[in-house]
Image (cartoon, coloured by chain):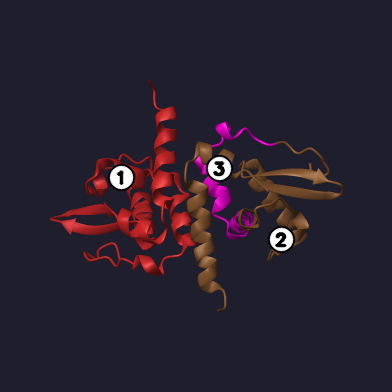
Chain colours: A red, B brown
Amino acid sequence: MEGDRNPQHPDVHTLTLQQVLEALVDPVRRSIVTRLHEARTDLKCGSFDLPVGKSTATHHFRILREAGLIRQYYAGTARMNALRYAEIDEVFPGLLGAVIAADRAASSRLAPA
Amino acid sequence: MEGDRNPQHPDVHTLTLQQVLEALVDPVRRSIVTRLHEARTDLKCGSFDLPVGKSTATHHFRILREAGLIRQYYAGTARMNALRYAEIDEVFPGLLGAVIAADRAASSRLAPA
């Protein structure tokens, strides 16, 4: 599946709250979502500074993709990631925004002044 | 601890998003939160129709209490549960409302017409 250049993406209307929360409960996955939202642009997998190895990172990106939170596509040889914010917000209004805001608030409390 | 008639409750300002999401990711715990919100009143532990045994239910109530989501107190011999909605919403704005709304929407889709 990792070699598939056109990974499958679920229709957000088929997602359950359970799937989305299970994706967001992991702090590494949540940091990917928050970073994508802050960047306001699509980012390639290699541009995230994650505290895990490459295969674990790939696993986290796949979970996010299967939970409908990100869309992955290729630009040349780089696998790009887009946050599906508007689509998720349509199905679970306010959820992603509240989680991202709380995650950013927590990060700013932890960051050195 | 279960015999303690005055269980400890965390100050919501000491809670992490991680704790709150870990509490809410469990569907039984989420159903307790949603039920308390719908009831608009405090409810005793025995009044929840949960698909788990009594000791597991007690465990779920404790996780919710430790995550700051509910306040527990005794009224006579009944252990009562109050949703700490306003307090949680102050620290994680919009989060609990979004989760409850999504949970209720999911329940209404599953319920027979």
Looking at the image, the residue that sits furthest to the bottom is B113
- x, y (%) of residue A38? 29, 41
| Residue B48, disc | 2
Whole-Å distance between the Cαs marked 3 and 2?
A: 23 Å
Which residue is tagged 1? A37
Q: Which residue is the extreme one toward the right? A: B76
The location of residue B54, given as percent across then percent down, is 76, 59
Does the magenta portion include A10? Answer: no
Is residue A84 visible to us here?
A: no
Residue at point 25%, 45% (across, down):
A46
- Of the 4 image quadrants, the one containing the N terminus of chain A is bottom left
* Contact flag, marks 3 and 2 (Cβ < 8 Å): no
Give the vertical position of B41 relative to A3 (above or below). Answer: above
Query: In the rendered image, which residue does mark 3 sit on?
Result: B19
The x and y percentages for residue A4 are 24, 66
Could one spot residue B91 in this view of the protein?
A: yes
**Residue extent of the magenta highlight:** B9-34
Name the amino acid, label 3: Gln
Q: Residues within 10 Å of mark 3 (few under 14, many from 20)?
A: some
Q: Which sits in the foreground, B7 or B97?
A: B97
Q: Is residue B92 left or right of residue B56?
A: left
